């Protein structure tokens, strides 16, 4: 075996010894308590039919973008969609990226400059941390959701200051104290950046996200909107002032040095935005079901379940090493629930991540709660 093979196998063996080796599995046909398809748009026949119908209108466009949007890859559907997105999320402009990961890396690596300072919530998504690692600015984590800790850390600030948070945290499912953060940022002329990945579709009258739901659009400098979750699609957009869009077109390497999204992805997104305002009953249903599950799980003394008002629930066991066995038992009972292990979450906070959807039923909620009670 060559040296490089040995090195890689050793790294994998280390993971396996810790019980954290990641492997790919295909989806199972089990009852979905795992995907980010909160509203069921990824499986919506209505959306599928709408996309087929709409695609006909764009027959003259190439299938693929054929290049970076700065070269051959731009066309009117990009601009039309970006204007729909900007209006929907009450921003001045929007710029599409090929995924949420790329939007965060593209935004956070380019925007804060040398001499600037970024404070980010310690629970921020890996894509935000990766973007900041590529930035020349000074970066400081602050304690999860602690405005107090952030306030203390402001003494390190130089240059333009940024605060970076998620509106709903992807792993913990809890919400950022956005109003307090917005107030602080306004007070100190700090640019607040909010990743709305897990809020879009669910919060706001039309599912605009938490920034718009709370009326904070004028105090938030940039919103990152992603399309792989409640929107049932793929891709992402940065919504903010026009000068930010122009800046990113000039300086964001994750925007510049990649082929634009294919036409079918743009059509699908346009159609998802057409349906999104009509999904109020789905928005209510998913929250109601999640609350039912929370209440059932909260009665069990064998586990701890958090947070109360979220469609993303974490189930903690007294012995985290039993998580994988529990997940396997739930899967045998027909429920697709996955354990989330370190290093995806900090060591000691391994949990089952349970995601509730508008298409889940009360019987499924009851069944899952009983299966968790049986397995713990
Ligand atoms: C908070 C947050 N931001 C960004 C992303 C990345 O989005 P995408 O899956 O579109 O790359 C995710 C996905 O897991 C996320 O949870």
Image (cartoon, grey):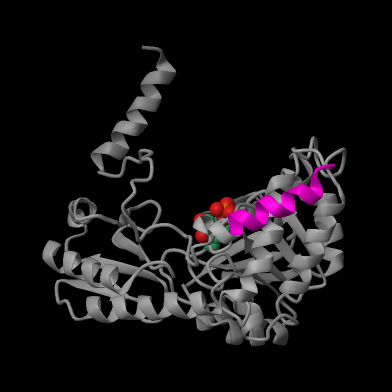
**Ligand 1 image-quadrant field:** bottom right
Part of the protein shown in magenta: 47-60
Tell me the residue at 14%/77% (across/down): 301
Residue 103 visible somewhere in the drawing: no
Q: Position of residue 211 (x, y in %)?
A: 64, 78
Above or below 288: residue 323: above
Q: Is residue 54 magenta?
A: yes
Looking at the rendered image, the quarter that the N terminus falls into is: top left
Q: Is residue 11 left or right of residue 160?
A: left
Give the camera-side residue of 318 and 285. 285
Q: Position of residue 255 (x, y in %)?
A: 75, 48
Residue 44 visible somewhere in the drawing: yes
Give the camera-side residue of 113 and 371. 371
Q: Position of residue 7 (x, y in %)?
A: 39, 24
Looking at the rendered image, the quarter that the C terminus falls into is: bottom left
Tell me the residue at 49%/63% (across/down): 40
Quarter occupied by residue 269: bottom right
Q: Residue furthest top?
A: 1
Magenta segment, prevailing SS (helix, strand or loop): helix
Quarter occupied by residue 115: bottom right
Q: Position of residue 314 (x, y in %)?
A: 33, 68
Q: Is residue 261 left or right of residue 319?
A: right
Give the camera-side residue of 4 and 244. 244
Above or below 68: residue 209: below
Quarter occupied by residue 271: bottom right
Tell me the residue at 75%/59% (across/down): 111
Q: Is residue 289 magenta?
A: no
């Amino acid at each position: 075996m060559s040296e490089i093979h040995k090195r890689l196998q050793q790294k994998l063996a280390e993971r396996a010894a810790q019980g954290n080796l990641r492997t790919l599995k295909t989806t199972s046909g089990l009852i979905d308590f795992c995907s980010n398809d909160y509203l069921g748009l990824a499986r919506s026949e209505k959306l599928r039919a709408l996309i087929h119908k709409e695609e006909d209108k764009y027959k003259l466009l190439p299938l693929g973008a054929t290049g970076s949007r700065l070269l051959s890859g731009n066309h009117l559907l990009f601009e039309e969609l970006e204007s729909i997105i900007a209006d929907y999320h009450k921003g001045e402009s929007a710029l599409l990226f090929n995924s949420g990961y790329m939007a965060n890396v593209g935004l956070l690596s380019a925007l804060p400059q040398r001499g600037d300072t970024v404070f980010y919530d310690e629970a921020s998504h890996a894509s935000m941390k990766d973007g900041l690692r590529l930035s020349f600015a000074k970066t400081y984590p602050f304690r999860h959701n602690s405005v107090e800790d952030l306030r203390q850390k402001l003494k390190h600030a130089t240059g333009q200051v940024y605060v970076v948070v998620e509106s709903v945290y992807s792993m913990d499912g809890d919400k950022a104290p956005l109003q307090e953060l917005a107030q602080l940022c306004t007070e100190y002329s700090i640019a607040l950046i909010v990743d709305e990945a897990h809020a879009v579709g669910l919060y706001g009258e039309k599912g605009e996200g938490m920034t718009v739901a709370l009326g904070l659009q004028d105090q938030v400098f940039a919103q990152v909107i992603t399309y792989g979750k409640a929107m049932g699609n793929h891709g992402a957009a940065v919504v903010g002032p026009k000068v930010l869009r122009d800046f990113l077109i000039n300086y964001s390497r994750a925007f510049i040095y990649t082929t634009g999204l294919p036409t079918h992805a743009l059509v699908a997104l346009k159609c998802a935005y057409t349906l999104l305002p009509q999904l109020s009953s789905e928005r209510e249903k998913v929250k109601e079901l999640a609350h039912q599950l929370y209440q059932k799980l909260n009665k069990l003394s064998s586990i701890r379940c958090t947070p109360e008002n979220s469609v993303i629930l974490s189930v903690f066991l007294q012995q985290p090493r039993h998580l994988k066995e529990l997940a396997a038992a739930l899967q045998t009972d027909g429920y697709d629930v996955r354990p989330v292990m370190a290093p995806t979450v900090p060591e000691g906070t391994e949990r089952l991540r349970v995601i509730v959807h508008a298409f889940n039923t009360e019987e499924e909620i009851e069944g899952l709660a009983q299966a968790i009670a049986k397995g713990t």
